[in-house]
Image: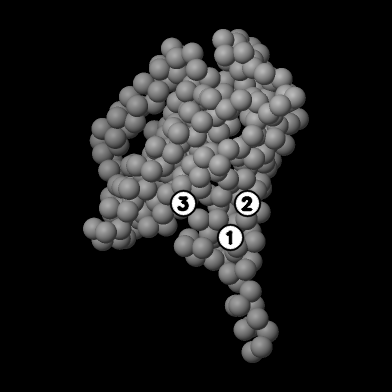
């Protein structure tokens, strides 16, 4: 029927529209949360202050809305169409953060953000794995979880020692992303447990691990927003989350890449590009000066004052 033909033709356009709206909402919510976190002085109870901040709650609502549009986009279109658009949240967030921090976005920073977004899109689309097991035994989890926890602890430890706010934000954002990657890998199994009743949910270690990684990840994400620029923490978080989830999927849940050797090589190359460009973006922000007429930030200021939102 003619009406059905029009509906099918409009389907990709609707997916693209939802994906772009989701990307913009993710970007705006990240900027709102970063500005709210940057207003919390060092030493104050971070989350206790944030939950009383309307701007932070607006950012959280924006995150939820962005996730809703992401789900709608994936329901209307393929991963091949949707995921590359969703990762443009990185590019949308960059000028927004620069506007509020009084810093300009250089051509080099645009190029780095673009390269990171393209690499992330390649990783998500080509590296889209086959479905694996959702109920792997606990001893399969032990080694990979220990390795990720060591990396997370190392990142947090270094962040506590280094003085550069951009490096602190990058390291804490990476640690938060890895924790969210773990919780993402656990979500499907915990959701499946609800079908077996509350006893199954409350007596499985996966439930408590999911809650713990989610809460700790949220705290570290907000700490990253508090201590340094969004251009350091947001790319690091965005990159680390799918990498952490993919690592668990391949090593624990028996997921496999759908691509052959060439596709696997492209995925590995994309991971390398993502890591390099995330660091380069952080370093570029560290040396970039505020725009003329804006308040300059002292290099030896405490982390809270060194935030671009102060």
Sequence-earlier tag: 3 or 1: 1
Where is mark 2, residue-wise? 22
Mark 2 element type: helix
Q: Where 126 sits versus 8, above or below? A: above
Q: Distance between the residues labelled 2 and 3?
A: 17 Å
Q: Distance between the residues labelled 2 and 1?
A: 9 Å
- Image point 75% across, 30% down: which residue? 54
Residue 308's image quarter? top right
Left-right relation of 227 to 258 = right
Mark 3 element type: helix
Where is mark 3, residue-wise? 118
Q: Nearer the viewer, residue 209 or 240?
A: 240
Query: Could you tell me residue 74's position as x and y percent?
Result: 54, 60
Query: Could you tell me residue 248's position as x and y percent?
Result: 34, 42
Q: Which of 194 and 138 is in front in this view?
A: 138
- Image point 72% across, 24% down: which residue? 294
Where is mark 1, residue-wise? 73
Asked if labels 1 and 2 touch by Cβ distance under 8 angstroms, the answer is yes
């Amino acid at each position: 029927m003619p009406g059905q033909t029009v509906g099918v033709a409009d389907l990709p356009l609707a997916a693209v529209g939802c994906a772009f709206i989701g990307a913009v909402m993710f970007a705006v919510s990240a900027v709102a949360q970063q500005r709210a976190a940057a207003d919390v002085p060092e030493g104050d109870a971070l989350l206790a202050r944030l939950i009383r901040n309307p701007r932070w709650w607006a950012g959280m609502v924006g995150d939820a809305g962005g996730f809703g549009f992401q789900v709608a986009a994936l329901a209307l279109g393929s991963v091949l169409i949707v995921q590359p658009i969703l990762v443009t949240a990185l590019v949308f967030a960059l000028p927004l953060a620069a506007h509020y921090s009084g810093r300009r976005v250089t051509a080099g920073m645009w190029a780095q953000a673009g390269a990171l977004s393209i690499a992330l899109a390649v990783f998500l689309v080509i590296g889209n794995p086959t479905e694996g097991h959702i109920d792997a035994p606990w001893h399969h989890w032990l080694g990979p979880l220990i390795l990720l926890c060591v990396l997370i602890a190392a990142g947090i430890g270094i962040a506590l020692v280094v003085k550069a706010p951009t490096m602190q934000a990058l390291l804490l954002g990476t640690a938060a992303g890895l924790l969210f990657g773990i919780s993402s890998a656990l979500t499907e199994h915990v959701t499946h447990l609800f079908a077996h009743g509350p006893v199954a949910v409350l007596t499985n270690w996966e439930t408590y691990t999911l809650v713990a990684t989610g809460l700790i990840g949220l705290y570290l994400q907000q700490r990253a927003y508090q201590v340094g620029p969004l251009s350091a923490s947001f790319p690091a978080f965005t990159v680390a989350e799918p990498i952490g989830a993919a690592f668990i999927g391949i090593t624990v849940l028996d997921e496999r890449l759908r691509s052959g050797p060439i596709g696997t090589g492209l995925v590995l190359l994309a991971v390398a590009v993502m890591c390099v460009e995330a660091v380069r973006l952080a370093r570029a922000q560290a040396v970039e000066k505020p725009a003329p007429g804006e308040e300059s930030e002292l290099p030896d200021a405490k982390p809270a004052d060194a935030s671009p939102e102060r």
